[in-house]
Image: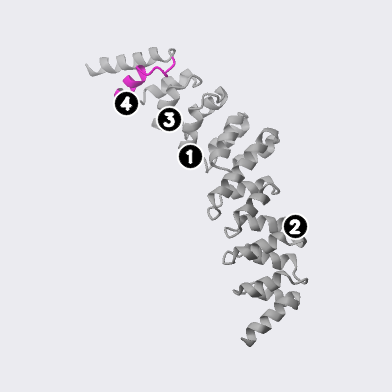
Amino acid sequence: MKDMDKDLERASSGSEEELRFLAHHTSSEILLALLNNQNLTEDIALIIANRKDINPGQLEVLFNDIRWQGSYKIKLALCKNPKTPQRISLTLIKSLRIFDVADLTRNQFIPISIKMKAEAAIIERIPTMPLGIKISLAKMVSGEVLIRLLEDGKKEVVAVCLNSPYMTEDVIFKIVNKVTISSLVIRQIANHPKWSCRYDLQCCLIRNNHAPLSRVVHFLKNIRTNNLKELYNDPEVPSSTKPFIYRELSERDESSQ
């Protein structure tokens, strides 16, 4: 108990060196005293903001402390900490730099609601972003933000999105099936060495009005006969593509005789 009393006294009025040591303490009482100590520095407050084994109440005290309301480091640490009350994280996101917000969208430890808010914050800014920022973002983001960058339709950005390690086939399918997507994006997908060789995606592109006919004809040779027949009867397949499907089916019939 005496040690605890000493630690509490040091947390309340101790020096910077003593506070730095106590910032790792497990006692909520001592941490609260430390947070109210006028000798607390930003670096020590940051240690507490980054702790994942801390009571959310201490993080709330940190957020409400007027001394740190201008500290970008502490704001960012609080947003990244899964123990931070969600209403605080949601409030702070709008004050973060765009690339830090992008990092939040990939953070596997914070709640999904925070990641969704981060995505929404980025998507809201995309229309007014400079091209260079969009290109850099395309290398970092995933999911809905990638979709929005593709929808934006800038050739250089689309190229980076399609090569992103965070791009998935599900996202590509969503884009190809969007009625409002530009022909430029569809052409880039149809010519992409990674995505254009996916069987299901080839079938999807064959149905798309914007897919280059030369690529569609190339895809037809890879499609199984039963799927080719389905495509021929599919009303979504462009009428300009139907003769080439018919020709491919006829050639297969002749070769099988």
Q: Secondary structure at mark 3?
A: helix
Q: Nearer the viewer, mark 1 or mark 2?
A: 2
- The answer, for residue 140, to whether it is visible in the render is no
Closer to the chain start, of discs 4 and 1, is 1
Quarter of the picture containing the N terminus is bottom right
Q: Is residue 71 left or right of residue 240?
A: right
Q: Read off the residue under disc 3.
A: 201
Q: Secondary structure at mark 4?
A: loop
Q: Is label 4 in contact with label 1 (beta carbons under 8 Å)?
A: no
Q: Which residues are magenta?
A: 226-238
Closer to the chain start, of discs 4 and 2, is 2
The residue type indicated by label 3 comes to: Leu
Q: Nearer the viewer, mark 2 or mark 3?
A: 2
Closer to the chain start, of discs 2 and 3, is 2
The residue type indicated by label 1 comes to: Thr
Q: Read off the residue under disc 4.
A: 224
Which circle marks residue 69 in the picture? Answer: 2
Closer to the chain start, of discs 3 and 1, is 1
